[in-house]
Amino acid sequence: MSKKVALVTGASSGIGYAAAIDLYNAGFTVYGAARRMDKLKSLEDKGIHIIELDVTSEELMVKSIETIINNEGRLDILVNNAGYGSYGALEDVPMEEARRQLEVNVFGLARMSQLALPHMRKNKFGRIINISSIGGKIYTPFGGWYHATKFAVEGLSDSMRLETAQFGIDVVVIEPGGVKTDWGIISADNLIKTSKNSVYETSAKETADKMRKNYSGTQLSDPRVVSEAIVKAATVKKPKTRYLVGMGAKPAIFIRKLVSDKVFDKIIKSQM
């Protein structure tokens, strides 16, 4: 029997990079995809196939799936990991940037799933693993558009799971907490840029400083914690619908369920 085939989007760094390697080590034929091919070169050196992919480009999305099917004849695992965090007060973020955040984090994920599903149905097997966040269950100031995308991924995944189960396809959500990647630094930089000369500038700077300190420290989880959950979701006979992993993830969700909105607001303000 031929190896199962996995595609990981956003594979040039962080969680996606670790997932591509761990899936390869678990015996999958792996395709790592991202916008910048130069960032994928080290994956290729390890035996992983690489593909140029921008999840805002219909042409590249279609081409990525066609390439895999032409080469392998199948696609078993799709890890929808591509995404970013665009931070800023709702009043400050241009609608063009808000639309781009949705385009990458939600519509790109949805379109990649649309393209993969016919091939999974044909084989009566498939796993679509969507990388969400605890930010799909909780909220922070200045993260409105990012949280909107992750809340959307949660709902979209739940509906897709019910629709595709009849074809032997599982839809799994991974909800990372604090993970040591460049995500937080990039988001903090975006927040400072967006809030310049804004009425929110002072509070935004305080939040950005805390984000940078947090993501520059040593308390956050290694991306491997998340990639290990991805491999588990890809390999076990009956995967969970959700995997809550990474620093602070389980306590944050537990507290959110336990306390009122106003109490949770105070907790979040004290942290951010």
Image (cartoon, rainbow, N blue to C red):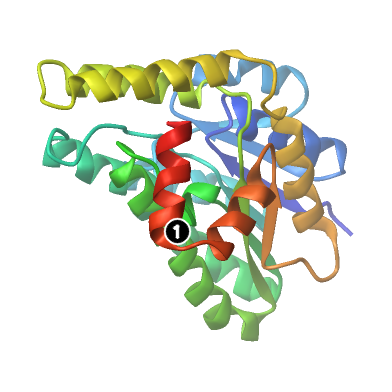
Judge by depth and name the residue closer to the eye, 20 or 51.
20
- Above or below, 225 relative to 193: below
Number of marks in the rendered image = 1
Q: Residue drawn 76% across and 57% down?
A: 233
Position of residue 158 in the picture relative to residue 193 (left or right) = right
Judge by depth and name the residue closer to the eye, 249 or 173.
249
- Circle 1 sits in a helix, a strand or a loop, which is it? helix
In the rendered image, the residue lying farthest to the bottom is 166
**Residue 108 visible to an observer of this rendering:** no
Q: Which amino acid type is shown beneath numbered disc 1?
A: Val
Q: Residue drawn 61% across and 75% down?
A: 121
Judge by depth and name the residue closer to the eye, 124 or 113.
113
Q: Residue drawn 10% across and 16% down?
A: 197
Q: Residue drawn 86% across and 36% down?
A: 25
Judging by the rendered image, the residue that carries numbered circle 1 is: 153
**Mark 1 surroundings within 10 Å by alpha-carbon count, few (fewer than 14), some (14 through 19), many (20 or more):** many
Quadrant into which the C terminus falls: top left
Position of residue 242 in the picture relative to residue 105 (left or right) = right
Residue 30, by quadrant, is: top right
Could you say where residue 262 lies in the image, as x and y percent from the top left? 38, 56
Residue 26, by quadrant, is: top right
Could you say where residue 138 lies in the image, as x and y percent from the top left? 47, 52
